[in-house]
Amino acid sequence: MKNIGIIGVGGLAEKLVVGLRRQGFSLPVHLSPRGYERSSSLSKLEACVIMGSNQAVVESSDVILLCVPARAIDQLAKEITVRQGQIVISAVAGVGHDRLERLFPGATCVRVLLSFSDQHSRAISVLWPEDEGCTHLLSMLGRVLAVSGEREFELATVAACMSGWFLFLMHDLHEWLVDNGLCPSQAHQLVVSNFQDSISMAASIPSSNLRALGEQASTPGTFSAKGLNVLRHQQVSAPWGAACEVVLDALLNRM
Ligand SMILES: NC(=O)c1ccc[n+]([C@@H]2O[C@H](COP(=O)([O-])OP(=O)(O)OC[C@H]3O[C@@H](n4cnc5c(N)ncnc54)[C@H](OP(=O)(O)O)[C@@H]3O)[C@@H](O)[C@H]2O)c1
């Protein structure tokens, strides 16, 4: 296990530090000085060390985690010099691997997509290219998925966006129930528990069987099938596909 340095102490870095500490990561965590309020709260609550500069983070850490906004990455690269072979893990969305290698020459660059969950087994981090040390570190947060290429990594980023979209779908279905007379708290419980049922069923079967599982829950003649026919007639999957395409396109063109 290696000590880590985080450059860019915002919302993501905070979740990362709390997640690692909760899972027993006890080595030093060095933080960049910007975002002082958050850094100082992490230094008190999670035993982190605030460094005087980004370069000081690099010099005192074995592994560097980049959690700055994409727009800050060029400026950051001018400020720091990494050691030959030093591992730089980038959580910065939309900044491709080739660009990272150009910005941080000599470093071993790895891209990650982090996820957090209250339950260790539910969180899933994605990384590319595969790296043993990085996998070991991220496995403290939950499962680690090493994808086979950068396009696959960006597809995983699209999948991460879906979790936000699901919330809007849940909101809309909740609103329909409320508009039709159910009290908000009961509508909330029903929408969430029905989503949870679908998730537990889906998690327990191979991906090739998802459609069959859906058909089983909507056999012909049922009320569920009646509604499904409307969704299919209105091609309800089409806008979801379009949203995925737009995000993938933006990610691939920004790298
Ligand atoms: N699941 C994931 O893997 C995931 C999820 C969310 C976000 N991300 C990515 O993670 C990155 C951070 O997201 P976030 O939500 O944590 O953003 P955020 O809350 O805006 O935090 C970014 C932090 O970086 C600091 N910063 C900016 N330029 C810097 C520099 N040159 N040196 C040191 N610190 C600098 C900012 O300081 P100031 O406030 O002073 O500017 C801020 O504290 C983004 O690139 C985003 O794409 C990944």
Image (cartoon, helix red, strand yellow):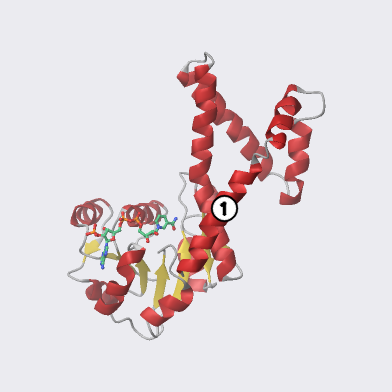
Total marks shown come to 1
The residue that mark 1 highlights is 244
Quadrant placement of the N terminus: bottom left
Badge 1 crowding class, 10 Å Cα cut-off, few under 14, some 14 to 19, many 20 or more, is some
Q: Position of residue 51 (x, y in %)?
A: 20, 68
Camera-nearest residue between 103 and 201? 103
Identified at 52% across, 13% down, the residue is 181
Identified at 46% across, 57% down, the residue is 114
Asked if one can make out residue 1 in the rendered structure from this viewpoint, the answer is no
Q: Quadrant of residue 101?
A: bottom left
Identified at 34% across, 57% down, the residue is 13
Query: Quick check: is the Cβ at mark 1 less than 8 Å away from ligand 1?
Result: no
Asked if one can make out residue 102 in the rendered structure from this viewpoint, the answer is yes
Camera-nearest residue between 243 and 112? 243
Q: Position of residue 78 (x, y in %)?
A: 27, 79
Q: Position of residue 183 (x, y in %)?
A: 48, 15
> Disc 1 on helix, strand or loop?
helix
Camera-nearest residue between 128 and 249? 249
Q: Along the horizontal axis of the image, is 49 left or right of 85?
A: left
Image height of 142 relative to 105, above or below: above
Q: Position of residue 43 (x, y in %)?
A: 23, 56
Identified at 23% across, 53% down, the residue is 38
User: Which three-letter amino acid code belongs to the residue tagged 1?
Assistant: Cys
Outermost residue toward the front in this view? 234
Ligand 1: which quarter?
A: bottom left
